[in-house]
Image (cartoon, rainbow, N blue to C red):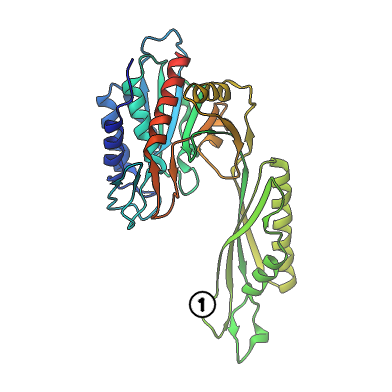
Amino acid sequence: MSEVNVDRLISTFCELVKIPSESPDDNEFIDHLSSLFKMMGGKPKKDSYGNLIVKFDAKNSKNKTSLAFCAHADTVKPGIGIEPIIEKDRIRSNGKTILGADDKAAIAQIMEMIRVAEKRPPLEIVITRCEEPGSWGSANLDYSMLDSKLAYVLDMEYPHEVVVGGPTRICLDVDYKGKPAHAGMAPEKGISAILAASKAISRLRLGKLDEETTANVGVIHGGEIRNGVPENAKVLAECRGLNHEKAVKLADEMEKIFREASEEVGTQVTIEREISLKAYHLDEKSVAVQLAMSALKKNDINPETKIIRGGTDATAFNEKGIQTGVLGVGYRDIHSNDEYILINEMVVMTNVIKTMVEDFA
């Protein structure tokens, strides 16, 4: 029986994180992965957006139905000049950069799984671009290139958690346009865009509104000089909900408040609204959930299902009709220079996905 080669897994991971792939500059890293997967016997191809899809033939399998695994190529900043430090139980950054375990640990685990699995169904490995800014890669993926109707995104922290649901996210970009004037000599001649924006923000319901729903204003830009009535102000806001209809209703409420404030102050207002994620929820009896839960149990992990309010590539996959769960890979403190990954959990999750493909085969 083939065992996970821990030294090779660690070496692969460390080599991957040393290659920069800060969003959106991940094309060279994807080309490198394409070469590596090809040397492993895969058939790599990029879609028009630059996402990488690698197909592997079945091996000792009675099941000819393909199974997909997805990870993302890009990292947040600072991700140039990463120097992984291997300690007794973990790998960390040197404190000057992120580590990049989000999500290169997943890629290393997928590679090791392919090397050691004694049998497997046809596999499709999807490496998406530009996940960090908002899952752009999966949103623009050419799904016609995929045969799989069952998939797993490897992009969470804890191995025991199987993510079975995600939120609707609605983005609102609000532009107020007023009338400039000298703030000391003739303020009465001006119309303040910042005043309209601030009135609106003060009336919004923000934060965690209930167990399913959140709202936030993340960015405000406005004005140019201290002694001028500001002509322009921009507000970037969002709301999220595990219930799609409730999220849409909240976005309607937010948009109404933005428009009412504009009317009160006398500005013009333009609002761009986009549903960047749409809520999904997998049945816990579904194949995607049961295959993962069974593999975790076989590797002595007590699994739990979880619904999150954050976005992953699984949202787009599920919207396209591909039943997709999300699994953890063992990283911690991501998006910070304190990021690290636990070696034992890397090994465990490699064994879990190995068990999954062998069971599915």
Please state if 287 lies on the left or on the right of 331 as rendered: right
Identify which residue, 30 or 342, lies in the foreground: 342
Which image quarter holds the C terminus? top left
Which image quarter holds the N terminus? top left
Identify which residue, 81 or 216, lies in the foreground: 81
- Figure quadrant of residue 35: top left
Whether residue 197 can be seen here: yes
**Residue at the far front in the pictured view:** 88
Please state if 225 lies on the left or on the right of 21 as rendered: right
- Figure quadrant of residue 201: bottom right
Residue 60 in the image: above or below residue 173: above
Residue 304 in the image: state x and y as whole percent. Answer: 59, 32
Residue 233 in the image: above or below residue 124: below
Q: Residue at x 42, y 54 (%)?
A: 336
Residue 214 in the image: above or below residue 167: below
Residue 344 in the image: state x and y as whole percent. Answer: 39, 35
Q: Residue at x 51, y 81 (%)?
A: 225
Q: Residue at x 62, y 29 (%)?
A: 282
Please state if 267 lies on the left or on the right of 223 as rendered: right
Q: Amino acid at mark 1?
A: Glu
Residue 87 in the image: state x and y as whole percent. Answer: 31, 45
Q: Residue at x 60, y 36 (%)?
A: 306
Task: Determine which residue is flagged by label 1.
Answer: 224
Q: Which element is circle 1 on? A: loop
- Figure quadrant of residue 116: top left
**Residue at the far top in the pictured view:** 62
Whether residue 165 can be seen here: no
